[in-house]
Amino acid sequence: MDEQTLLEPQVKLTTEQILLIKQAAQRLKTKFEGTFNAETIERYITDSQTRLESRAKFATWLPVLIERFTHDRLIALARLEVGTLDRPGVLFLCVHNAGRSQMAAGYLRHLAGDRVDVFTGGSDPGFDTNKVVVEAMAEEGIDIATEYPKPWTDEIARAADVIVSMGCGDACPIYPGKRYEDWELDDPSGLPIEAVRPIRDDVRLRVETLLASLELTPVS
């Protein structure tokens, strides 16, 4: 199966959803005005739409997810091309980007605030964030219910200072000059919350250690 076939849309967008994506593109153009031209933003939002459409089971939330995915990619591109490297960037990778990497990102955002650019991705992204993982993180006062699985992209991997892999093995990207960490964590997929809590707590300890290595203290 070639790449074009793999990226064929699995859902059909309504006219209203197509309009919402156009409105999202306009918001991104406004936000990144002076950083990227309209053509660059259009190219990235179109590519993000293609990538997410090819994996989606339902189209309901696609306009929102496409806007958020494109936003993250443009932040990464700005780090690379415009030199907005005033804070570290961390990319958490796992296979499905539905459990471990989402927990790690949730903790890092919670503990670091806006002092770190946080990215996630999967080598074989799932369709939904693990609901038990969402519940376990909610017990910690961290809401990751709106997070979503997505593929890692070249510009995000290149923009990260630290790439943390969690079981994606050879499928994880390798770029010279990056700091790599390999976290051996059990996969929470299919586990009850009683079994997910120890994984969650292990993730928090590792994130706290990572934060300290970046010479940052927790904000909460």
Image (spheres, helix red, strand yellow):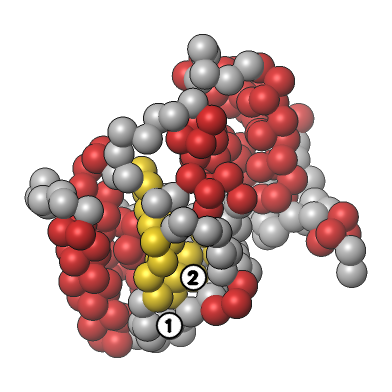
Q: Quadrant of residue 4?
A: bottom right
For image coordinates 53% across by 30% down, the residue present is: 81
For image coordinates 72% across by 30% down, the residue present is: 43
For image coordinates 56% across by 69% down, the residue present is: 172
Q: Are marks 1 and 2 in contact (CB under 8 Å)?
A: yes
Q: Residue furthest front?
A: 177
In the image, taking residue 198 as reference, residue 64 lies left or right, namely: right
Badge 1 amino acid:
Asp
For image coordinates 60% across by 77% down, the residue present is: 170
Q: How far from the left and from the top, in percent, is residue 209?
A: 19, 66
Badge 2 amino acid:
Cys
Q: Nearer the viewer, residue 20 or 163?
A: 163
Mark 2 residue element: strand
17 shown above or below 55: above
- Residue labelled with disc 1: 187
Q: How far from the left and from the top, in percent, is residue 41?
A: 64, 26
For residue 11, which numbered disc appears in the image?
Answer: none
Q: How many marks?
A: 2
In the image, taking residue 29 as reference, residue 138 lies left or right, namely: left
Q: How far from the left and from the top, in percent, is residue 205?
A: 18, 71
Q: Nearer the viewer, residue 114 or 132?
A: 114
Mark 1 residue element: loop
- Residue labelled with disc 2: 94
| Residue 65 visible to an observer of this rendering | no
